[in-house]
Amino acid sequence: MSKSNFTRRGVIKTGAVGGAALALPQYLRADGHAGFTNAPGDSEVVLGFNVPQTGPYADEGADELRAYELAVEHLNGGGDGGMLNTFSSKVLDGTGILGREVKYVTGDTQTKSDAARASARSMIEKDGAIMITGGSSSGVAVAVQALCQEAGIIFMAGLTHSNDTTGKDRKANGFRHFFNSYMTGAALAPVLAANYGTDRKAYHLTADYNWGYTTEEAIRASTEAVGWETVNSVKTPLTQTDFSSYIAPVLNSGADVLVLNHYGGNMVNSLTNAVQFGLRDAVANGKNFEIVVPLYSRLMARGAGANVKGIYGSTNWHWSLQDEGSQAFVRSFGTKYGFPPSQAAHTTYVQTLLYADAVTRAGSFAPCAVAEALEDFEFDGLGNGKTLYRGSDHQCFKDVLVVRGKENPESEFDLLEIVEVTPVDQVMYSPDHPQMGGAEASLGECNNGA
Amino acid sequence: MTDQTTQPTSVASPSARPSSGTGGMLGLTKKDSTLMLIVFGLVMLAPFILNPFPEGSAMAQFNAGYPDLMQRFVIFGIFAIGFNILFGLTGYLSFGHAAFLGVGSYAAIWSMKLVTLNVIPGILLAIIIAAAFSFIVGFISLRRSGIYFSILTLAFAQMSYALAYSVLTPITGGETGLQIKNTDTPLFGGPTDGSIGRANLFGAEMGNSFELSLGNWLFTFNLGYYIAAAFMLIAFYLSIRIFRSPFGMMLRAVKSNQQRMNYTGLTPKRYTLWAFIISGAYAGLAGGLMVAMDTQVGPERMFWTASGEVVIMTILGGAGTLMGPVLGAGFIKYMENIISKINKDILHEWFAFMPDGLEDIMVSVVYPFIGKGWHLTLGIMFMLVVIFLPGGLVEGGQRIAARFRRNKNAD
């Protein structure tokens, strides 16, 4: 009996509420008067760290999370301050952001756009996060960036290397510190030309998804510009674990360089296969056969073991850099966790600091004000030398590292050595570059939300 | 839920067929109308029921009453209800249902990009396209039964996934998927000021919410949720009607003894194919609603793990029962969205009242089960349910109800 009473009352009640909801088509919040989504209170501000905790990039996600925790600690005045001491902008003083203590929530993207968006939406709708950051895959970054644009939240991208994130899919509320495929190509090609000559014939194996496409396009364009020829390019399924059938035809194709546009587990497997097939000892066209891996990460180098020795690639940042900022970061990260940080950790740490700094300089958490403070912001002391956050596409421009697998590693973290620091001018491109979506790509209007 | 307890037995006897007008409403028996009313009440009051803890309290972590998760509850509820029509009634275990959800999603987003940002045409198109696709897949796969059928559907789903992920990148956006962009120009009513279009229902946006603050409690009534909920109630109602219809009877006959059915002169495939198409259409509806609530599609929606998820939802809740799939869907989505967000800091807060050493021990004991360990927790729960409650969560409800009834009798 009591049950049916409950239901009847429920029907009436929700009927009334539902009617009210339909009649009030504004997104009303208690703090709606602040003019932007999730305006923080006076004592604390919540940031959302959305990283892959399960799935293929879980290791990178874990390292990102460590870096975020470190950044929060430093922003709140804990620890040794890390890069706050070396950052060229001095407005952050260890009292949180605009006097509010920094709190954070975490979520699992599972490296799936759906799960990542669900997690980000729960941070926005439930936890009141003012900024979302993270991600370890371009697909996820693009998906979450679009969500943040719609919701009126700032998105600070984590590890995402595809051109699209700040190319054809760029958004006014999204910012990327990490470098991209184009920069990899531009930095790598001259080094390859210097070491392997300008009359090489390249064979590409490309992971069959967006990041693979943009990377192949970038490497082709820049190696062909220095005189190389592209013999063939073959797409490999992302789920492939055995690449022998793809490697076998390479030697007879007339190519003398193999470019592996693979990331993570793909690269570990394809490189291992290539080495097992004796490609490294082979001679083609009277030259030593060479292998190139455009995007390196420490995790991949560790997975591929001794096979990476002498192989060229590029990376956003490396812990062995000797500048003050990098050293300060490696010191505080090492003290807290006992090992040096990865490039994923570095970029996410820096993004958090850059956001906090932009809010402080803008004097407001409103996304449009923050975006304005970040646009065309020049800074130094965060590890990559002088850096520009370009306003027209929200991409950071900085020196790019060309690295090579170390011949005699001293520890499991000491696998890569820096060959060259490519100056930023060499990797610069115009915002309407064809690889970046051409003239059609636009940021759109910045969105403050409700 | 108590009213559901006697369903499975009464269902099996043909006498349970409703004669409209006797005690129930909308052609349902009295028991079914009560069940329908309970579901209606639960769904409508979800913003209250799912937000039992006040804002800012330590338990607020467990609140699930925010729009995104509520929408997911009902959308995956629809998906699981549809799956249950096939699996629960005919016993045919499809391992590729996520493909229909994905196809529906792509259809809906293209409708929004090209035709109109209104969600209704998108959802209808999603249902139609998914039903058509499931006709093709079903027509081929249903030539076999048992494990061979499962493998065939799995193969189709993985094929669709691979196509969407890379081969069909121009149509599906590849790994990145599709979103509504400011450059999209739908035929009717796109934004003119260069902003990004939002999914709406005759102008009312899906994201519109009304917030009710009562003391420390904050309840969110979201338009998108209520639209999805309306579809879910219709889906649930249709599922009851199918369960109680002669058609449903035939589907059960397929499950119990297909050979006998053949000898009787009936063609099982006609029924199973219809069941397959109906459940494919349900999946398409779920896919269309997902796009309506959150205008984005990615191919991993069709990955085999997504197909596996709906199987787990149905079994966890109770295959072949009306309420089971909905409960299972809610349970899994809750674990995925709530448990995965608990991190070490939150644990330290919870156990802060303990002495330091003990606190650390407690945190390290609980830590593997939360955050990234949510899969582990879900796996353990699933095992426990399958071992101790073979009939799923619904059986758990029945047992509790039976205990209460016994106690009452004892009084």
Image (spheres, helix red, strand yellow):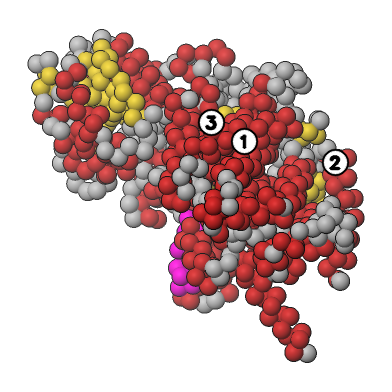
Q: Earlier in the sequence, mark 1 or mark 3?
A: 1
Measured in 3D between alpha carbons, the distance from the residue under mark 1 to the one under mark 2, in whole angstroms, is 31 Å
* Residue A33 x, y percent position in the rendering: 80, 41
**Label 2 vs label 3: CA separation?**
31 Å
Residue B196 x %, y %: 68, 26
Tell me if A72 is positioned left or right of B286 in this view.
left
Quadrant of residue B392 in the image? bottom right
Secondary element type, mark 1: helix
Residue B77 horizontal/vertical position (percent): 65, 51
> Which callout, 1 or 2, points to the residue nearer the camera?
1
Nearest the viewer among B64 and B280 is B280
Q: Is residue A22 left or right of residue B57?
A: right
| Residue at 70% over, 22% down | B115
Whether A47 is drawn above or below B395: the answer is above
Q: Overall secondary structure of the magenta stretch?
A: helix
Residue picked out by circle 1 = B131
Spatial CA distance of label 1 from label 3 is 22 Å
